[in-house]
Amino acid sequence: METGNTSKSYSFIDLFSGAGGFSLGFHMLGFHDLLAIEQTETAANTYKLNFPNSQVILNDIRKIHSLKIIEHVQDKIDVVLASPPCEPFTSANPRRMKTPWERFYHDPQGDLIFHAIRIIGDLEPDFFIIENVIPIAEKESQSIIKEEFSTIGHDKIHFNYISAEKHGCPSVRRRVFISNLKLHLPSRKVHTVSSAIGDLPSPNYPNDYQGHFILPFAKQAESKAFKMRKGDAAVHFGGAKGEFRNWIKLDESDVCPTVMGKSRFIHPTENRPLTIREQARLLTYPDSFHFLGSVEEMFNQVGESVPPIVSRGIAEKIKNNLKKKKGF
């Protein structure tokens, strides 16, 4: 699913590519991805399928030396993208460690952001953007991140807070984008669940939409699904901070709640779970973008993405600044 033209002026690499939501927005603006790195095989295969001209390294970033990246790309890298796993920091994780220090230095995945910073320091791109959940930017956590960036010569970084639903995404998603650039995205019309999925045919019948097929309810949701009101949730669970909900019956006239990797929703007007394609639309993936793997893996790929519409807005800001910096 390559987009853009073949004579791209600017380049990027994606250090935690996942399925490719972050990359897709940059592709739409004509950027050329020199390299994607992803540890999960099914997500890497999804990336390869949708960006067949791209190089993908299937490996743990902790095992990758910057010299290997330079050897692969053999070109100037204008932008580095990174979305390290949010599990050590998200309040939805009931096993989240208590202090920021523990989350960064004791959680097995907590140090992954430091490897992104290491590579940014080695490659010296013009711009970098690291996306994650809001708690990674709380006071003590910010100090840790700033200290790491200062070791590679970046004494001034920006914690950009972006709410996806304010920029054209039909689902709520508030994230922080850590960058050496201030990111102010223009507000867009609020899109509802209905505007995102209302034109899709019923998945009860054969159709041409990948991932648009009937799925079963989870056992804990099945007995409640048929008598729920819109906005209600069949499943409640405790996170590190507060209560979280799953198997929410959507309201077609409102935006969708935050879509996470394990999120499941009930269709607003039909007694059935949302399909993978419907969930992908709620993150602004185009229908031409296909996902690979098991049902659970495909849902995870969708829910762990940067919405392409947000990525595109960021890419536009980056592109304008590269034009000013490079003079073309």
Image: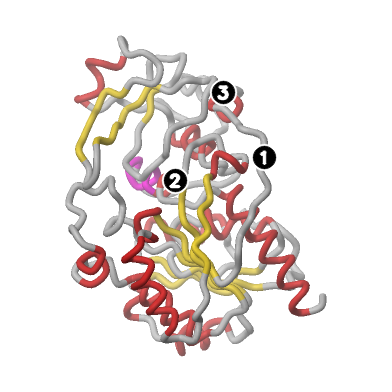
Give the quadrant of the C terminus.
Answer: bottom right
- Check disc 3 and give the amino acid type: Ser
Left or right of 27? Residue 61 is: left
Give residue 194's mark: 3
| Amino acid type, label 2 | Val
Q: Is label 3 in contact with label 2 (beta carbons under 8 Å)? A: no
Report, in whole angstroms, how far the alpha carbon at label 1 lies from the one at label 3.
17 Å
Rate crowding at label 1 as few (under 14), some (14 to 19) or many (20 or more) other CA atoms within 10 Å.
few
Task: Give the camera-side residue of 272 and 212.
Answer: 272
**What residue is drawn where x is 71% and y is 62%?**
30
- Spot occupied by residue 115 in the image (x, y as percentages of width and height): 37, 77
Q: What's drawn in magenta, residue-wise?
A: 295-300
Residue drawn at the location 63% of the way across and 55% of the way down? 184
The number of callouts visible is 3
Q: Crowding near pointer 3: few (<14 within 10 Å), some, many (20+)?
A: some
Q: Residue at x 52, y 86 (%)?
A: 70
At mark 3, the secondary structure is helix
Of labels 1 and 3, the one closer to you: 1
Q: In screen coordinates, is 104 left or right of 215?
A: left
Q: Position of residue 19 (x, y in %)?
A: 46, 55
Disc sitting over residue 302 in the figure = 2
Task: Using the numbered discs, state the Cα–Cα distance from disc 3 to disc 2 in whole angstroms.
Answer: 19 Å
At 49% from the left and 86% from the top, the residue drawn is 153
Tell which tag, 3 or 2, sits nearer the viewer: 3
Left or right: 109 in relation to 28: left
Q: Position of residue 175 (x, y in %)?
A: 46, 52
Tell me which amino acid carries mark 1.
Answer: Arg
Nearer mark to the viewer, of 1 and 2? 1
The reply to whether residue 271 is in sight is yes
Instruction: Identify the residue position indicated by label 1 in the image.
Output: 188
Say whether marks 1 and 2 touch (CB < 8 Å): no
Q: Specify the principal SS of the magenta part.
A: helix
